[in-house]
Image: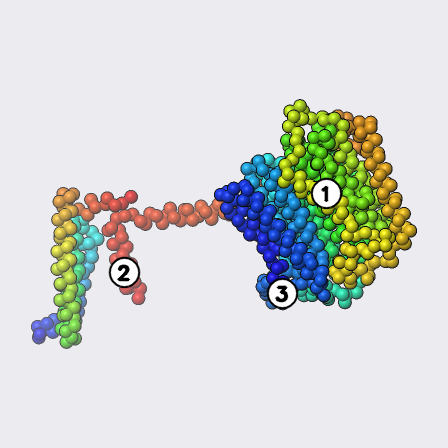
């Protein structure tokens, strides 16, 4: 039965190899079947492994494939670890991944890079599975870099567009900054514990006392890695730009799976984080600030995908807030529900963009409810879920985060509540502007409007159902039902939660909190409805005068401009100076003179080879004479 | 035998060296292919002379056996070499080796 686990990443790898190598020669139908089929196979195996993990006594299965690196005291085996945490991620990745593959078959049908797209997508799933299955930090790192690569390839998928290529480079380079921190963190773990294997590291960590500087350093370095990959302040600017990629990519990589790798990594290292309350505090503060910051930018964006991108950044911030206050289960719970509803929202947005013929500006949409009824209904489900309306999935996970934050720190709770109130507002703003009132696009576009094909709508429906029921795995205990997810993930977080979790909130307080959050969300929806539907307000057109406050938000707080001034320009200046002085005056001179020296030597030696036999003979005789006499 | 021993060994060495040097300088300095060819023969014969002289002085017949071999090879070489020279003369109308530089460049 254990032999099943290596199959999970193997299927997408085989899919990638076949589609990547022979994609040009086989038909689009076979590509679709191969690529989606490999993910489906992985999903089925993941379900089997999930059941097995749940039933096994130790709740963790290790499969050792081979010894990978063995050097001095460092021993790294290439082995997989299936425990409740990785099993849950496996299901999310392969399940949502499969639906997105099916969706892409319809979405990418007309694209000339069809086979390339599916090859990359399969490769991405392979690396993502490696990331969550690895039993040590090195395999995690390999998967981490691999998904970064696939993200780069897929953001720049339409590589003829320079802006898209720049977005891809931006994502890659920003991630590099985080990865450096992550790598240093891993090295520090090795120096401290003498191993990078999860089981050994965490086994030793249990005996460390709290507040050791080295643990704080490790956790902060790891968190820098998470900041890059999961788009937290200050390394978040790549994610909104990453929307340059095809929409299914945004759904799979930049919403449901890859960006949650940071959450996975911190949840995985929960024992280390628990040992360092300072790092936990940093994680929580960065999380809540990111959430607030991104949500406020989301309020005034006009690109349908940009709104969703900022909302993703904001939701990721909430997940980190949950981790930072020690509610690891809740963080993972939100990863799961977020994967459902955010994938749904992105795919819904993709369906809209598909119908609009590539238009992404919500000012040019409107009234699409009539033309795209299925897309509208599913998008509505996703919007209700992200806004935290009962009984959709987001309600449960978000309220759990808020409740845990409330216990931990009232001020953080206040900020997080504002962020989630803004979420409800901008998501309904998006919904109303896109689907309500009259159509604002061109006549041609209106004529072209159509509901998407079945391969696109079926994943939408399935994800809408998941967004509706996904929250029921974590019903708060207020309702006198057992919290299934808590029980399931308990083996992973047991050692930490003993230390961090205070008493459960007073039930009365929790109900008050839930009612408060719910009423705020409903108030926000009412506000959005009032403003955009009843009063029929529209976002200002391009170039129109807008109030200063709104302008700052619309321009994303000028963070990109700030980074350009503070980092890019000095960097370019230094590069330019290096080019002028060191490269031209120093390196070039040395390299060129070596080349010229060799060339001069050859030119001179060439003269010896005259082609006249007498000369050769003379040289021969003289040489023989020389040899004889010298001896 | 007696006559041979009456002449000191040094004389043979000297004669042989002179003959060999004439051969070398002839090869180096002359243009005419036939003369060069003869100079090569001269060098071979200088060596032959040395072989027989040492053979007689040391009472060892090996040197004389070697001389026979050299003569046989030289005869074959002359046959081939002269044939080539005839062909060169037929094609270029001269036996000057300077004309034979067509393979240069």
**Tag 3, which secondary structure?**
strand
Q: Identify which residue is drawn at 65% across, 47% down.
A: A97
Q: Nearer the viewer, mark 1 or mark 2?
A: 1
**Where residue A362 sits: x, y (%)?**
72, 31
**Tag 1, which secondary structure?**
helix
**Where residue A437 sits: x, y (%)?**
76, 28
Q: Nearer the viewer, mark 1 or mark 3?
A: 1
* Dot 1 or dot 2, earlier in sequence: 1
**Where residue A404 sits: x, y (%)?**
84, 52
- Do callouts 1 and 2 point to residues on the same chain? yes
Which residue is more in the foreground, A622 or A56?
A56
Q: Residues within 10 Å of mark 3 (few under 14, many from 20)?
A: few
- Do callouts 2 and 3 point to residues on the same chain? yes
The residue indicated by pointer 2 is A624
* Contact flag, marks 1 and 3 (Cβ < 8 Å): no
Q: CA distance from mark 2 to mark 3?
A: 62 Å
- Return the chain for callout 2: A
Q: Identify which residue is drawn at 74% across, 64% down.
A: A205
Q: CA distance from mark 1 to mark 3?
A: 47 Å
The residue indicated by pointer 3 is A74
Q: Is any atom of residue B16 visible in this view?
A: no
Quadrant of residue A295 in the image? top right
């Amino acid at each position: 039965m254990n032999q099943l686990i290596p199959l999970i990443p193997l299927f997408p790898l085989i899919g990638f190899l076949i589609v990547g190598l022979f994609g040009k020669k086989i038909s689009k139908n076979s590509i679709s079947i191969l690529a989606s089929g490999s993910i489906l196979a992985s999903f089925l195996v993941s379900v089997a492994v999930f059941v097995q993990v749940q039933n096994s006594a130790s709740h963790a299965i290790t499969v050792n494939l081979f010894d990978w690196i063995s050097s001095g005291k460092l021993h790294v085996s290439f082995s997989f670890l299936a425990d409740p945490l990785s099993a849950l991620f496996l299901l999310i990745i392969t399940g949502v991944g499969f639906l997105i593959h099916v969706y892409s078959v319809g979405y990418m049908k007309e694209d000339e890079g069809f086979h390339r797209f599916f090859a990359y997508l399969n490769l991405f799933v392979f690396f993502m599975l490696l990331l969550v299955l690895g039993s040590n930090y090195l395999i995690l790192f390999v998967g981490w870099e691999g998904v970064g690569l696939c993200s780069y390839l897929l953001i720049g998928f339409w590589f003829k567009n320079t802006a898209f290529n720049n977005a891809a480079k931006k994502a890659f380079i920003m991630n590099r900054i985080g990865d450096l921190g992550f790598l240093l963190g891993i090295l520090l773990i090795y120096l401290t514990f003498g191993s990078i294997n999860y089981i050994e590291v965490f086994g030793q960590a249990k005996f460390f006392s709290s507040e050791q500087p080295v643990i704080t350093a490790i956790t902060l370095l790891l968190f820098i890695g998470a900041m890059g990959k999961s788009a937290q302040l200050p390394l978040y600017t790549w994610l909104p730009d990453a929307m340059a990629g095809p929409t299914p990519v945004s759904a799979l990589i930049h919403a449901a799976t890859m960006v949650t790798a940071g959450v996975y990594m911190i949840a995985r290292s929960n024992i280390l984080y628990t040992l360092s309350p300072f790092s936990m505090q940093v994680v929580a503060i960065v999380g809540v600030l990111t959430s607030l910051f991104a949500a406020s930018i989301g309020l005034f964006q006009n690109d349908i995908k940009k709104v969703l991108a900022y909302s993703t950044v904001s939701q990721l911030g909430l997940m980190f807030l949950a981790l930072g206050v020690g509610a690891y289960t809740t963080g993972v719970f939100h990863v799961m529900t977020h994967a459902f509803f955010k994938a749904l929202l992105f795919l819904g947005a993709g369906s809209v963009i598909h119908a609009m013929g590539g238009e992404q500006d919500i000012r040019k949409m409107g009234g699409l409810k009539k033309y795209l009824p299925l897309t509208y209904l599913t998008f509505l489900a996703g919007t209700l879920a992200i806004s935290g309306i009962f009984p959709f999935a987001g309600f449960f996970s978000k309220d759990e985060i808020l409740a845990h934050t409330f216990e931990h720190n009232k001020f953080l709770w206040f900020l997080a509540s504002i962020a989630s109130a803004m979420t409800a507002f901008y998501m309904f703003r998006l919904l109303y502007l896109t689907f309500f009132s009259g159509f604002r696009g061109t006549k041609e576009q209106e004529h072209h409007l159509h509901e998407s094909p079945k391969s696109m709508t079926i994943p939408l429906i399935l994800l809408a159902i998941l967004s509706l029921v996904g929250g029921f795995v974590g019903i708060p205990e207020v309702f006198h039902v057992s919290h299934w997810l808590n029980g399931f993930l308990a083996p992973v977080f047991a050692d930490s939660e003993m230390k961090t979790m205070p008493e459960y909130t007073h039930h009365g307080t929790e109900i008050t909190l839930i009612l408060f959050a719910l009423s705020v969300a409903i108030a926000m929806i009412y506000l959005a409805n009032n403003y955009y539907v009843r009063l029929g307000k529209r976002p200002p057109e391009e170039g129109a005068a807008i109030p200063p406050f709104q302008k700052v938000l619309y321009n994303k707080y000028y963070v990109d401009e700030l980074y350009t001034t503070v980092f890019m320009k000095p960097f370019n200046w230094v590069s330019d100076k290096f080019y002028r002085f060191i490269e031209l005056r120093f390196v070039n001179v040395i390299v060129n003179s070596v080349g010229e020296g060799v060339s001069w030597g050859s030119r001179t030696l060439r003269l010896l080879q005259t082609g006249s036999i007498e000369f050769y003979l003379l040289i021969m005789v003289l040489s023989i004479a020389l040899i004889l006499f010298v001896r | 035998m007696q006559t041979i021993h009456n002449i000191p060994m040094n004389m043979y060495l000297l004669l042989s060296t002179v003959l060999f040097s004439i051969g070398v300088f002839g090869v180096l300095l002359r243009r005419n292919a036939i003369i060069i060819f003869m100079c090569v023969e001269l060098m071979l014969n200088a060596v032959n002379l040395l072989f027989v002289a040492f053979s007689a002085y040391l009472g060892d017949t090996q040197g004389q056996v070697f001389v026979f071999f050299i003569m046989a090879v030289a005869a074959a070489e002359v046959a081939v070499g002269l044939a080539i020279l005839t062909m060169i003369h037929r094609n270029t109308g001269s036996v000057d080796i300077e004309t034979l530089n067509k393979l240069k460049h």
